[in-house]
Amino acid sequence: WIQVTGIHDHFAFSRMGELFNIHTLTLEDMVNPAHPPKFEDFDNYYYVTLKQLVFDAENHEISETQVSMAVMENLVISVQDRPSPCLKAVEKRLQAGRGKLRTAGSGYLAYALIDAVVDQSFDVIGHIAETVEFVEREMLEDLNPDLLEQIHRLKREVIFFNKQLRPVRVAILSLIKSDSPFVPDSAIRFYADILDHVNHILDAVTSLQELLSSMLYFYMSAQGNRMNEIMATLTIISTIFIPLSFLAGIYGMNFKFMPELDWQWGYFVLLGSMAMIGG
């Protein structure tokens, strides 16, 4: 297993392509961190690129790291633009000599690496789900504008997660269906297990998207109900004061021959009438 960290030494990649007969298009994909996940089958190797996703709990954001692999006979070359904790876990398993990593061939090692990258997504979606549950509890206690901002931010992160992971499903499916000699029949069931994991994660993403949409609808409905209550209060106040304003307007015209203007008790009778109407 040759593990390459960093993608900016183009001479090293060019030399690696010459040594291991790696196509120039594959080398270009390896050094392009924005390339979407995919699977390609060549004569002497197959190439797969994935996105390792990490959730930043402090900023509630998802960051991505590209992990690319060229799998040959008895050789796996992995490339990542920065150190990958999940690949370190596989490295420790190799050093400890646990399981079949040292004896089952390059296809099984590639499975272990891909499985580690995909399983990292379980942690990410778990953190997002916890944050969504926290925001949901906050909504039931107090509706404030900050919650709306958090819901929109979570929706963006879930959409980003879905965008990064969905091509992984296509890549794994293409790998399973390929006739590459570097995907032995004994490893197919392991890759199928990875595909099941991806499908479970995508189902969880879909559920989170629906939940966030429901939370947004609930927030908007609650805000609408609150506005309706305010409008109802204002309507009641207006209903009371409209007839009083009408009476005040009549006796505020100051016509010379208004008989009530010269009446000694007119002012008090008018106030009493207005109190009765308001009551």
Image (tube, rainbow, N blue to C red):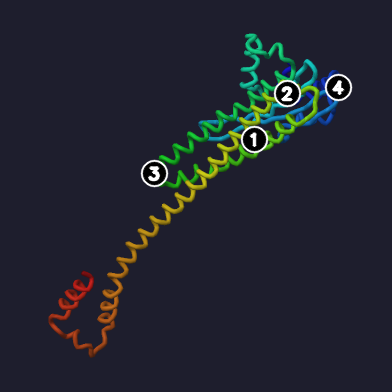
- Among the two numbered marks 2 and 3 on one chain, the one whose residue lies closer to the N terminus: 2
Q: Which residue position holds label 1?
A: 165
* Of the two numbered discs 2 and 3 in the rendering, the one whose residue sits closer to the viewer: 3
Point out which mark residue 21 bears. Answer: 4
Q: Secondary structure under badge 4?
A: loop
Report the mark closest to the observer, 2 or 4: 4
Q: Nearer the viewer, residue 53 or 176?
A: 176
Q: CA distance from mark 2 to mark 3?
A: 46 Å
Q: How many marks?
A: 4
Q: Which residue is mark 3?
A: 140
Find out whether the residues at labels 3 and 1 contact each other: C-beta distance under 8 Å. no
Question: In the rendered structure, which disc, 3 or 1, sits on the residue that comes first in sequence?
Answer: 3
User: Do the residues bearing badges 2 and 4 touch, measured as CB atoms within 8 Å?
Assistant: no
The label number, if any, that marks residue 79 in the structure image: 2
> Which comes sooner in the sequence, label 2 or label 1?
2
Q: Quick one: label 4 or label 1, which is nearer the N terminus?
A: 4
Badge 3 element: helix
Q: CA distance from mark 2 to mark 4?
A: 16 Å
Position of 258 relative to 6 (above/below): below
Look at the image and tell me in which quarter the C terminus lies: bottom left
Tag 2, which secondary structure?
A: strand
- At label 4, the amino acid type is Asn
Whether 189 is drawn above or below 245: the answer is above
Position of 99 compared to 24: left or right? left
Is the N terminus in the top left, top right, bottom left or bottom right quadrant? top right
The single residue placed furthest to the bottom in the displayed view is 257
In the displayed structure, 259 sits above or below 192; it is below
- Upstream in the sequence, badge 2 or badge 4? 4
Looking at the picture, which amino acid does disc 2 mark? Val
Q: Amino acid at mark 1?
A: Leu
Give the image location of residue 205, x and y in percent. Answer: 57, 38
Distance between the Cα atoms at labels 3 and 4?
Answer: 60 Å
